[in-house]
Amino acid sequence: NAGVIQTPRHKVTGKGQEATLWCEPISGHSAVFWYRQTIVQGLEFLTYFRNQAPIDDSGMPKERFSAQMPNQSHSTLKIQSTQPQDSAVYLCASSPPGVDTQYFGPGTRLLVL
Amino acid sequence: QEKVQQSPESLIVPEGAMSSLNCTFSNSASQSIWWYQQHPGKGPEALISIFSNGNKKEGRLTVYLNRASLHVSLHIRDSQPSDSAVYLCAVNYNQGKLIFGQGTKLSIKP
């Protein structure tokens, strides 16, 4: 079991560019979660999917951020027109059906210059 | 807005001693309370969870929950250098998202 896979592990973008982050959940898991971690704000919830359907996006910034789950084996988080304040570690987690435990990936460290 | 607060921010404990970490949350209607461990450069890893008032023991870990006082604590018996990490308290609302505290950095001194 490879665990949750996130790619890339590190990404550097210039201000105003687009960044797409990928997450492959653990096989058989039905829920996928996205979080963002910074020193100042800590670990913050962004959005989650269950059985590929969007359930709660209450933590997503309303502009520039979007998430999709086109199939059960991957999810993407897209940030348009990146800003320096978007610099953070973006973490993806997945959960099996009927279980509360969230299994986290190693994260993608995004740096916006 | 749900809030989770952890104390202390950092803790140094001698090897072999008990480590005690605290967490308060803002909403008694929360579901499960989780403790996660995070090492530098890694994602958080679930350690133990509790739902009902009282305590739960797993190996060297014991967690106590008091919903009336909105307080949960984690105790690590016989602390080892490998326990050095950041410990995150998280509250699960609506069977989905986790709301995390800011974390406690635990250092075990050999």
Image (cartoon, grey):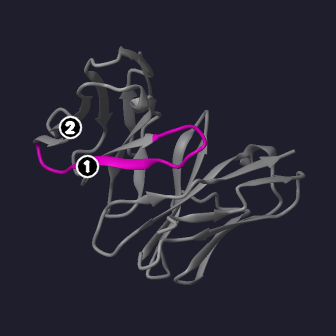
Q: Amino acid at mark 2?
A: Val
Q: Nearer the viewer, residue B68 or B51?
A: B51
Instruction: Point out the tag, 1 or 2, that comes first from the N-terminus.
Output: 1
Q: Hey, which quadrant is residue B10 in on the image?
A: top left
Residues at circles 1 and 2 in contact by the CB criterion of under 8 Å: yes
Residue drawn at 87 percent across, 44 percent down: A113
Q: Callout 1: helix, strand or loop?
A: strand
Does residue B40 belong to the magenta stretch? yes
Q: Position of residue B45 (x, y in %)?
A: 42, 49
The magenta span reads B38-53
Q: Position of residue B60 (x, y in %)?
A: 22, 35
Q: Nearer the viewer, residue B6 or A106?
A: A106
Above or below, A68 relative to B82: below
Q: Amino acid at mark 1?
A: Ser
Residue furthest to the bottom in view is: A71
Which of the numbered marks, if any, corresponds to residue B80?
none
**Circle 2 chain:** B
Above or below, B102 relative to B53: above
Label 1 Cα neighbours within 10 Å, binned few <14 / some 14-19 / many ≥20 = many
Residue furthest to the left in view is: B54
Above or below, B45 relative to B19: below
Residue drawn at 43 percent across, 59 percent down: A103
Label 2 Cα neighbours within 10 Å, binned few <14 / some 14-19 / many ≥20 = many
Instruction: Give the labeled residue for mark 2.
Output: B63
The quarter of the image holding the C terminus of chain B is top left
Instruction: Give the labeled residue for mark 1.
Output: B49
> Is there one chain holding both mark 1 and mark 2?
yes
Per the model, the C-alpha gap separating discs 1 and 2 is 8 Å
Residue drawn at 30 percent across, 28 percent down: B22
Q: Position of residue A49 (x, y in %)?
A: 48, 73
